[in-house]
Image (cartoon, rainbow, N blue to C red):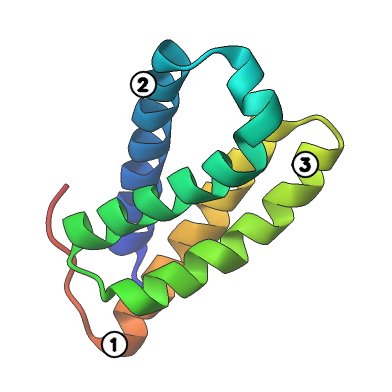
């Protein structure tokens, strides 16, 4: 596992998710997320994972697979009402996945 990629992926994904969350919260009413959160949350997660892939120069297809896998445990947290703890867990799982992708593919990540 490439630890440099692990930390860069975690930081990049965390910043991307945080920034997009703030923008969406400012632009849309809370009721929107009650009705459409099931769709916008995963879509936002995918967009942020593509940003991370781009910033770190990782291949997008394996990164998207990792984003989907990392999002699964997050669903459990959402169900029990701990949405943001689930997001942090997903970021950690996603970062580990990206670090393994980088190691397995011999990629060198760019600086953040």
Q: What element carries label 2?
A: helix
Among the 4 quarters of the image, the one containing residue 35: top right
Cα distance between the residues tagged 3 and 2:
23 Å
Residue identifier under label 1 = 105
Q: Along the polypeptide, which appears first: circle 1 or circle 3?
A: 3
The residue shown at (76%, 31%) is: 82
Tally the numbered discs. 3
Nearer the observer: mark 1 or 3; the answer is 3
Q: On the image, numbered disc 3 is attached to which residue? A: 77
Residue furthest left in the image: 111
Element under disc 3 = helix
Q: Considering the numbered disc 1 on the image, is that residue within a helix, a strand or a loop?
A: helix
Q: Which residue is drawn at 58% across and 51% down?
A: 90
**Looking at the image, is 98 positioned above or below residue 55?**
below
Mark 3 nearby-residue class (10 Å; few <14, some 14–19, many ≥20): some
Residue linked to disc 2:
23
Can the viewer see residue 104? yes
User: In this view of the protein, which residue sits in the foreground, 97 or 78?
Assistant: 78
Q: Nearer the viewer, mark 3 or mark 2?
A: 2
In the rendered image, the quadrant that contains the N terminus is bottom left
Q: Nearest the camera: 84 or 107?
A: 84
Numbered circle sitting on residue 89: none
Q: Give the mark nearest the N terminus, 2 or 1.
A: 2
Residue, x 45% and y 44% (percent of image)? Answer: 44
Mark 2 vs 1: CB contact within 8 A: no
């Amino acid at each position: 596992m490439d630890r440099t990629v692990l930390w860069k992926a975690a930081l990049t994904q965390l910043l991307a998710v945080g920034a997009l969350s703030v923008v969406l919260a400012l632009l849309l009413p809370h009721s929107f997320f009650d009705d459409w959160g099931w769709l916008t949350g995963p879509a936002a997660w995918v967009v942020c994972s593509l940003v991370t892939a781009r910033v770190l120069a990782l291949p997008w297809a394996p990164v998207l697979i990792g984003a989907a896998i990392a999002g699964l445990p997050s669903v459990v947290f959402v169900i029990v009402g701990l949405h943001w703890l689930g997001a942090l867990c997903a970021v950690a799982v996603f970062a580990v996945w990206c670090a393994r992708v980088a190691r397995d593919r011999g990629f060198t990540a760019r600086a953040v």
